[in-house]
Amino acid sequence: MKLLIVGCGTIATSYVRDIKAHAGLEIVGFTDVDHQRAESFAREHGGTAYPDLTAALADPAVEMVVNLTIFEAHYTVVKQALEAGKHVYSEKPLALKYSEAEELVRLAQARGLRLACAPITFLGEAQQTALKQVRSGELGTVRLVYAEVNQGRIESWHPNPGPFYAVGPNLDVGVYPLSITTAVLGRVARLSAYARTLYPQRVTKEGIPFTITAPDYYVINLEFESGPVMRLTTNFYVSKETKGGKVIEFHGDKGSLALESWFESGVRVEQSEFGKPYHAVPLLRPASSALDWARGVQDFSQAIESGRPARVTGEHAAHVVEILDATNRSVADGGQPVTLHSDFPLPDPMDWAR
């Protein structure tokens, strides 16, 4: 599959490294609003540095667009790529509004194209192990889920923290546990939410003060159509090194399961019978602790080439965007419940996780 990388910022380095490690994926070129960045990537990794997106999409060698632009550009870039007849894999979120995400899903369907979107950490070894344990009934009927997102203070490490604080923690990192839990349990039917700004005055690494424009703390109560309820807490304040910083817990009638992280693939999975100590669950196959940023691109590419249903889909990503939209509506309405309407096909487990 011949890929075009759109957006040559911080995350592109990780994507390109991991894409090059997978057979069957080939990067044919790069484009960026800063053409010098695209040229730099092309010199280092090979391929064409296109002058702009229009020129890149006009190249018949490009089969799939990998969209790594900033949040605000996702909708525009994905739409332009689909209209040019290209399959699209986008970084998260698919769009900033559910109406836009829904439009992109329908556009892909109308054009006979495939659309996918990160995050794909539910394809990781630890996450697939948890998925199998829950779906197989090891915990009995699951009724309650806890998920924590303590992502720290973006300005302490990122050179451009502004876009993250413009949208808040849910769009950036809350999408990870949301993608995992919906991949395991299915669609969310209703939610209510609370938000607050804990730490409005921030300072960049260069010492420049700035004021954040979106809440940096959320608590969301989600009701899955399949029955369980979930409490998701997200923030851009508490260090990610805090105890339980990225944990997801599934609690059922027979017992509980704890997934140490919604991000890394090789983390601990622990299970317990009700009222008894936790014990380690062996992962379904060995894994490194690192995230393979290209795993979703590879699986998506293989789905296109083989004609099978994709595990990573635009419909799933659009449902997550509707959750984010509904969260903001609930916050604006004083925490009142909001009903959701979108749906998506549950992803199949990986072949090695069946």
Image (spheres, grey):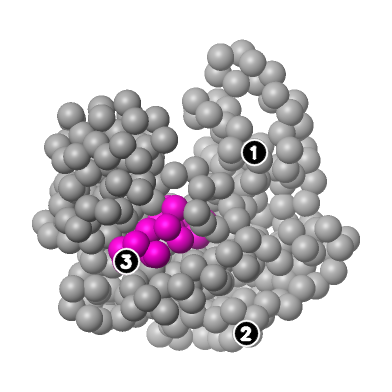
Query: Closer to the camera: disc 3 or disc 2?
Result: 3
Query: Closer to the camera: disc 3 or disc 1?
Result: 3
Provide the residue designation for mark 2: 225
Question: Would you call the spot at circle 2 few (<14 residues within 10 Å), some (14-19), or many (20 or more)?
Answer: some
Q: Residue at x 64, y 16 (%)?
A: 208
> How far from the left and from the top, in percent, is residue 197?
78, 40
Label 1 with label 2: CB-CB less than 8 Å = no
Q: CA distance from mark 3 to mark 1?
A: 33 Å
The answer to whether residue 125 of the structure is visible from this angle is no
Instruction: Out of 30 and 213, give the one closest to the viewer.
Output: 30
- Is residue 93 part of the magenta span, yes or no? yes
Q: Is residue 230 above or below residue 307?
A: above
Question: Would you call the spot at circle 3 few (<14 residues within 10 Å), some (14-19), or many (20 or more)?
Answer: some
Q: Residue lying furthest top in this view?
A: 207
Instruction: Out of 201 and 270, give the one closest to the viewer.
Output: 201
Q: CA distance from mark 3 to mark 2?
A: 35 Å
Instruction: Out of 104 and 156, give the one closest to the viewer.
Output: 104
Provide the residue designation for mark 3: 85
Which mark sits nearer the N-terminus, 3 or 1? 3
> How far from the left and from the top, in percent, is residue 235?
65, 45
The answer to whether residue 213 of the structure is visible from this angle is yes
> How far from the left and from the top, in percent, is residue 154?
57, 33
* Dot 3 amino acid type: Gly
Chain part drawn in magenta:
77-94
Provide the residue designation for mark 1: 165
Label 3 with label 2: CB-CB less than 8 Å = no
Q: Quadrant of residue 43?
A: top left
